Amino acid sequence: MRRNKRILIAILFLAQWAMAFGQERLTLDSCLAAARQHNCTIKSAQLDVLISREVKKQMLWKYFPQVDLNGFAFGAASPLVDVDVTQMASAGLGGVLSDVLEIINALDSTRHVSSEVKWIRWGASAQARAVQPVYWGGQIVTANKLAKLGIDAAQLKQEVSERDVLQEVTETYWLVAGLMEKRATVTKVRSLLDTVNDIAQTAFVHGLVTGNDLLKVRLKQNEIETNALKLENGIHLAGRMLCHLIGAEYTGELLLDSFPANGDMVALLERPDTFYVEARPEVKLLDANVRYHQLMRRLTLGESLPHLAIGVSGGYSNFFERNRFNGIAFATLTIPLTQWGETSHKLRAHDYQIKQAELMRQDLHLKLTLQNRQIYSQLTEAIRLMEQHLSSCELARDNYQLSLMNYQAGVGTMSELLESESLLLQAENAYTDARISYLSALRKFNDYNK
């Protein structure tokens, strides 16, 4: 049965190797590069920057003349002007016109002049106008500054999004690598249990131990196999998460770079006296928020200032079957007189918003300083724990070897040997967890203290 189990493990290993053969080995740097290129959150932040740039380009057109064309044409079922001149009663004009028409008709009997006047059955007109703002209360300049501020804010948000995503990729990468390291530990422990089982079998055949020792080994092997199954499920789940973050398709077993050795770990850092958080994008975002409210106040003020514009207009019309062209130059000046009461309250509200934004910036500055200290503490704690667990691993290995020799010599029990094996597995896994915590904390410390 033990031989069949070994064959099954070998088959599974070969199947995983065959499935992974030809795949590119993933390193942390390659995963970070793929995330920058394919991650949905990062790509969305990049699109926000492009959107902000297009808004800025829209605002530039406000400096140029606003040109528009208008056209109008109509056709009426009946003439718009339809009068009888003989019915005009103003100062007896109707009677005079009636006499004139009779005289004309009498002089020329071949031509009859009607007393009805019918005009404007159809017509058309077209107009072109160009208006150039000269002074618009500073609103155009302020709007362009706001658009430029929008680009800066979008770029800062992109920086924050990219940093957070890359941190998540790093943590997930080391999670997968750590789980694979634990799988290697389980494989090693499985081999140790096979050795113990061989020793127990030999001792049982020679009557040195009872069947209880064999049963204890089998039960321990079953426990290890159960843990190995859970570990495989965790590796696949974490692998899927990593592939999702880097925009890759999960095809099964991942090939990762080797887990960093002990020599790759840095020494304990000296505690810095202070942390400079002014370069953090979160602080710059709140600086932009203060500037935003200042510009909004200036925009509101511009609504109550005079507006001056100049322009030209040219047009064509044909309403009396006669083409007419004309052009004019004009200037407009608008001076708001009754809006200062409302505007004063708006400006006061903007002043309060500016103070509010400044308070938020000060509060965030303190919180980020505390956060950096916390990140530093997590890093130093991870380094210390890693050193402690490394020492525990060495002790657990020595303890297992001693228990194995005692059992072989007949001065130790199977329970002591299996307990030493459990302690070894526990120490190895704890050391792997400490290394993962250290690598994630180191990445976060470097990202937040550039």
Image (cartoon, rainbow, N blue to C red):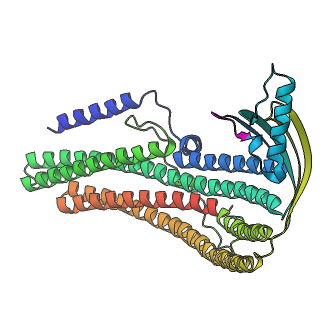
Residue with the most extreme top position: 110
Q: For this rendering, which residue is in front, 299 or 442? A: 299
Q: Mark yes or no: residue 411 visible.
A: no
Q: Quadrant of residue 220?
A: bottom left
Q: x and y percent of residue 177 in the render?
A: 44, 48
Relative to 382, 360 lies left or right: right
Q: Residue at x 64, y 65 (%)?
A: 282
What percent of the width, then of the height, locates residue 290?
A: 71, 71
Count of labels in the image: 0
Q: Nearer the viewer, residue 163 or 110?
A: 110
Asked whether the viewer can see residue 431, the reply is yes
Quadrant housing the N terminus: top left
Q: Position of residue 36 (x, y in %)?
A: 59, 44
For the C terminus, which image quadrant? bottom right
Residue 184, placed above or below residue 410: above
Q: Position of residue 317 (x, y in %)?
A: 81, 36
Residue at figure coordinates x 59%, y 69% from the top left: 376
Please name whichever residue, 221 or 240, is drawn nearer the observer in this view of the structure.
240
Residue 79 magenta-drawn? yes
Say whether residue 157 is magenta: no
The answer to whether residue 312 is left or right of residue 377 is: right
Q: Is residue 325 left or right of residue 50?
A: right
Res 303 quadrant in image: bottom right
What is the magenta range? 75-83
Residue 74: name its quadrant: top right
- 138 or 244, nearer to the observer: 138
Residue depicted at x 28% and y 57%: 421
